[in-house]
């Protein structure tokens, strides 16, 4: 692992710091989808960090991350706005990933693949097709799915009618083409910035490789991880993807493995402190709440 050792502590810290900047873009996208003021960017960035941290480390993968992200926002943002903004953010994130993946496939098709390995292109194409199907399904379900949910709430869950209608109202309010386009562009910028981060990591390891080829590689890796969305953090999928795809575009296997390990270490360095800080914050809120209840009952001196 001589290549990986070139990154060093300083290099890893630079890569880690750059990666945090990508989360600011993701937080800004969610903020824009919610239509909240810019001074809440920090809150939405923390929610996005928590969402990714839980998806990388905790059981139930993406579902756990979504739940915790919504939980964090719930104390300061209206629930209906959180849910509607999440739908818009998720839709535009998947659509922007599709755009980035198609861009990467176009680049890969223009790059001679070592050994003519058609399995490489087949796997990438499968990932792109799955993402396309998800985008199409969500576009079709956005309007009729909401109407169906409102009808079911009226019929089977009368108590939830107001909440469902509130989410529907927020979703319609936030679905202006200009806002959707802005959120899409922010998410697309985040995908590109994330791919650019891999090129930066390689440069910090003193490996000079064309930026466009690294972006095509990263778009393919993201597509493969989307295929394995049920696996927390895409454990094993990311590493296997680098082992399969990197040599095909001429990136040495040792450099690909070093990059995969650097990204995995970065994920852990982001996720572990994020979850610990969240746990400590929730524990502090619980202690304060318990103390206030005891004071109200006269069980503690003022």
Image (spheres, rainbow, N blue to C red):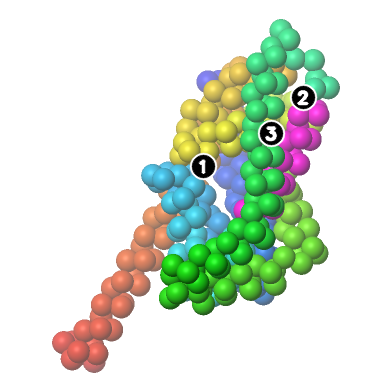
**Of residues 281 and 186, which is closer to you in this image?**
186
Which of the two discs, 1 and 3, sits closer to the camera? 3
Predominant SS along the magenta part = helix
Q: Is there a contact, CB below 8 Å, between mark 3 and mark 2?
A: no
The first of marks 1 and 3 along the sequence is 3
Question: Which of the 4 image quadrants contains residue 35?
Answer: bottom right
Looking at this view, name the residue that lies furthest to the front: 155
Classify 10 Å Cα crowding around label 1: few (below 14), some (14-19), many (20 and above): some
Counting from the top left corner in percent of width and height, residue 95 is at: 71, 47
Which residue is denoted by mark 2 in the rendering? 108
Q: What residue lies at 64% left-to-right and 23% top-to-bottom?
A: 123
Location of residue 61 with respect to 280 vertically, above or below: above
Badge 3 marks a residue whose secondary structure is helix
CB within 8 Å, label 1 to label 2: no
Q: Which is in the foreground here, disc 1 or disc 2?
A: 2
* Quadrant holding the C terminus: bottom left
Q: Secondary structure at mark 1?
A: helix
Q: Residue at x 25, y 83 (%)?
A: 293
Q: Is residue 301 magenta?
A: no
Q: Which residue is mark 1?
A: 267
Residue 130 rendering spot, x and y as whole percentages: 64, 35
Residue at 32 percent of width and 66 percent of height: 283
The image position of residue 80, as x and y in percent, is 55, 71
Corner quadrant of residue 99:
top right
* Disc 2 secondary structure class: helix
Q: What's drawn in magenta, residue-wise?
A: 88-108
Task: Please say whether residue 95 is one of the residues in the magenta stretch.
Answer: yes
> Which callout, 3 or 2, points at the residue further toward the start of the chain?
2
Q: Nearer the viewer, mark 3 or mark 2?
A: 3
Name the residue beneath numbered marker 3: 128
């Amino acid at each position: 692992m001589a290549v990986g050792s070139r990154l060093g502590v300083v290099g890893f810290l630079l890569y880690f710091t750059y990666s945090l900047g990508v989360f600011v873009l993701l937080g800004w996208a969610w903020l824009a989808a919610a239509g909240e003021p810019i001074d809440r960017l920090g809150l939405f960035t923390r929610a996005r960090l928590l969402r990714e941290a839980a998806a990388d480390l905790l059981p139930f993968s993406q579902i756990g991350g979504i739940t915790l992200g919504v939980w964090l926002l719930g104390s300061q943002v209206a629930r209906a706005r959180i849910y509607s903004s999440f739908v818009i953010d998720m839709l535009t994130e998947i659509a922007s990933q599709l755009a980035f993946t198609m861009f990467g496939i176009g680049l890969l098709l223009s790059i001679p693949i070592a050994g003519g390995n058609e399995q490489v292109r087949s796997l990438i194409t499968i990932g792109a097709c799955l993402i396309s199907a998800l985008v199409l399904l969500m576009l079709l379900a956005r309007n009729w799915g909401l109407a169906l949910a409102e009808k079911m709430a009226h019929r089977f869950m009368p108590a939830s009618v107001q909440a469902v209608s509130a989410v529907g109202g927020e979703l319609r309010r936030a679905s202006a083409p200009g806002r959707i386009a802005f959120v899409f562009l922010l998410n697309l910028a985040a995908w590109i910035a994330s791919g650019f981060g891999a090129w930066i990591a390689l440069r910090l390891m003193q490996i000079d490789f064309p930026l466009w080829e690294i972006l095509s590689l990263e778009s393919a890796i993201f597509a493969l991880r989307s295929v394995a969305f049920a696996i927390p953090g895409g454990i094993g999928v990311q590493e296997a993807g680098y082992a399969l795809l990197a040599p095909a575009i001429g990136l040495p296997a040792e450099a690909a493995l070093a990059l995969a390990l650097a990204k995995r270490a970065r994920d852990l360095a982001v996720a572990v402190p994020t979850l610990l800080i969240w746990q400590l914050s929730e524990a502090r809120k619980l202690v304060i709440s318990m103390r206030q209840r005891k004071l109200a009952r006269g069980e503690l001196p003022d």
